[in-house]
Amino acid sequence: MFSTVAIICIAVNTCIIMLNVLLRRFFNMPIYGSTEIVRYISLACASFAIVEHEWVNGNINMPIILDAVPKKVRAIMLCTGYIIATGVFTFISYLLIRQVMNRYTFHSVSPDLGITLWIPALVLSIGFIAMTLTIIVKAVICGWMVKTGNNIVFERLRKD
């Protein structure tokens, strides 16, 4: 799901950029606020793509070290990393939610198009909350791996 949203955002961004370049080059009429639109769509794209990346590839990955240790030690190391990452991303999500509330309270708007800035901030915080939940799920799975000694490959859990 998250990769689909990211792909749609990239496609829309590409179309806006191409249309803006063509209109500017051939008709001397650029799209007003196109850089601002591209900026916020890119923010949404990155916010949702990072969740997909964490689930299938994993940001906390040390293959040189992990391949050299036994499976149970590897699971303990991954579980510890995910627990630390959960704390960090929970704090970042909290700060982003505060930013949404501040931008909503003070009615902050973008300079060119007057877009209310709490909406892009909300999109970013939704992405980070989803990232936090993904890391929590992976921490639970790694805890289960430590307890049972089984190994799960996260790429296989992805539905295509």
Image (cartoon, grey):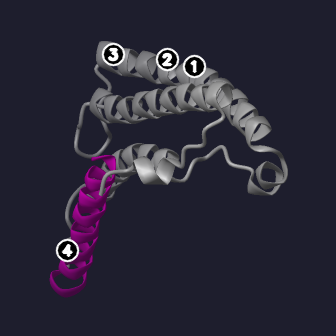
Q: CA distance from mark 1 to mark 3?
A: 23 Å
Q: Position of residue 8 (x, y in %)?
A: 23, 58
Disc 2 and disc 1 in contact, CB within 8 angstroms:
yes
Q: Residues within 10 Å of mark 3 (few under 14, many from 20)?
A: few
Q: Amino acid at mark 4?
A: Leu
Question: Which disc, if any, is residue 54?
Answer: none
Q: Position of residue 72 (x, y in %)?
A: 75, 36
Q: CA distance from mark 4 to mark 3?
A: 34 Å
**Residue range corresponding to the magenta coloring:** 1-27
The residue under label 4 is 19
The quadrant in which the C terminus is found is bottom left
The residue under label 1 is 91
The secondary structure type at the circle numbered 2 is helix
User: 100 or 45, which is in the foreground?
Assistant: 45
Q: CA distance from mark 2 to mark 1?
A: 5 Å
Q: Amino acid at mark 2?
A: Tyr
Residue at (30, 18) in percent of width and height: 104
The secondary structure type at the circle numbered 4 is helix
The residue under label 3 is 106
